[in-house]
Amino acid sequence: MESSAEYWLTRWLLQRGLGAIYLSAFLVAANQFRPLLGERGLLPAPRYLRGLRFRDAPSLFHWMASDRAFAACAWAGVGLSLLAVSGFSESFGTPFSMTVWALLWLLYLSFVNVGQTFYGFGWESLLLESGFLAIFLGAAGTEPPEALIWLYRWVLFRVMFGAGLIKLRGDACWRDLSCLDYHFETQPMPNPLSWHFHHLPSWVHRAGVLFNHLVEVIVPFAYFAPQPFAAGAGVLTILFQGALIVSGNFSWLNHLTLVLAFSTFSDAQLGLLLPLQAPALSPPAPPHLVLVWMVVALVAALSYRPARNLLAKHQLMNTSYEPWHLVNSYGAFGSITRPRYEIVFEGTDAPIPDETAPWRPYEFRGKPGDPRRLPPQFAPYHLRLDWLMWFAAMPSRQFEYPRWLIMLVARLLQGDAATLALLRANPFPEAPPRFLRARYYLYRFTTRAERRQSGCWWRRELVGEFLPPLSLEDRGFREVLRRLGE
């Protein structure tokens, strides 16, 4: 192993990168948690916490489940993230650094463990696992504990190798190399370049799948190889994650994985691009080293189930095995959807909600709606409601109406300002609509010729009705809301 003094710049990048991801995550919580999970949210966290034991879902909100507490914790996380990004947290010794990173981890754990389906994404656990290790990285003036650098490589290995295996074991299109013929069009939230990636030649798509298999299945083993092989594996991983970042919106999954790839480099390699001078470094204090080796032992013990999962015939994807999210299983896109369906909400003020009524659509911030609108770029910021709308529109879930979706309809009919702030615009700024309906569309990217002729990025075809016209004056709908506890 290389001297731990060779990883000062590696630690510097890991801490700054993790701080930036935490910042994005807490900004999402500050802006979205209350309308999604607050006291009058679509899935109220206070209701969820009733009867839930702390040991099953550790969270500060067991003792302070209110909108004020949610906001205070989110903005506290933003402030602590800025300390981490700026390096201020590393300037006053290891105890101060550990305190900042421990608070970041505890605050975010508190949100994740009460976030229900809105926080049910693999990158939540990935941030918590990576953030937990960051508690013990040490301050700027101490040598980085080398064992932690290797633990970050172990996290990176599980992210990449887990994603590779879930694909090879999953959809046949990963084996016949055709998945990218569909992926850019049907991914959860396309970005401004997705249309262009979709129209690349078929041979480029197949080469992309081969590159995916190379980087996710073969390259991860080189993370543990001597230099310069480990760094070479890191370069390939960064290039791969960069391609994913520019071709779609996957929250902070790719950005965080890219940050983890910094653990494969030594200071000598990183210094070629970042000529920063390390300060005089002192060895970690004995108590710090004891904590580090306790963490190593804990991770080793908790790694049994994730490692076994990698070898299992029925591999689990994005799974936590304990409520602290310390060592997890990861994976993505084991199956690829072929057709893309979207749910479009529309409202009207007309007294009779028939086809002659003037229906106005609600536009979401990120998911496709208006065919003329260029898909926007939001990642690493995570639009949680938009993502769940993608899941709700899947053919396998057609005509399933989860609680959050029914409550979304109710909030739009009520003209709830917090809920409307999650959308791109409010088509009823003066008063909420009398009726609201949801229509089910098949969306496809336009061809190059269609794009030139119509100016549209999408073409869509009405499939049918997802929800009939609903009103707060309707007795049946009021009864549904009553049963939901509204």
Image (cartoon, rainbow, N blue to C red):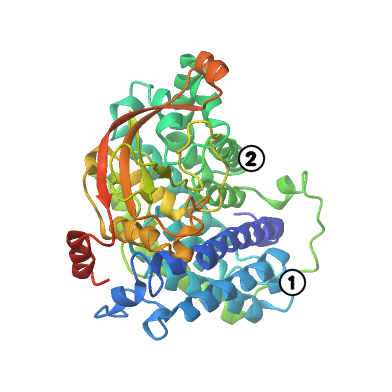
Q: Nearer the viewer, residue 468 or 289?
A: 468
Whether residue 389 is situated above or below residue 472 in the rendered picture: above
Q: Position of residue 46 (x, y in %)?
A: 34, 77
Labels 1, 2: front one: 1
Residue at the limit of the structure toward the bottom, as seen here: 63
Q: Which residue is mark 1?
A: 141
Q: Is residue 290 visible?
A: no
- Residue type highlighted by circle 2: Pro
Circle 1/circle 2 CB separation < 8 Å:
no
- Pinpoint residue 111: horizontal percent, then vertical percent: 43, 70
Rendered position, 362 above or below 278: above
Q: Secondary structure at mark 2?
A: loop
Between residue 307 and residue 346, name the one nearer to us. Answer: 346
Q: Which residue is mark 2?
A: 228
Of the two numbered discs 1 and 2 on the same chain, state the one appearing first in sequence.
1
Query: Quarter of the image holding residue 176?
Result: top left
Residue sitting nearer the eye, 334 or 371: 371
Residue at horizontal 46 percent and vertical 77 percent from the top: 67
Q: Quadrant of residue 432?
A: bottom left
Alpha-carbon span between mark 1 and mark 2? 27 Å
Q: Disc 1 on helix, strand or loop?
A: loop
Q: Residue at x 45, y 38 (%)?
A: 369
Q: Where residue 482 sits: x, y (%)? A: 21, 70
Asked if residue 257 lies left or right of residue 277, the reply is left
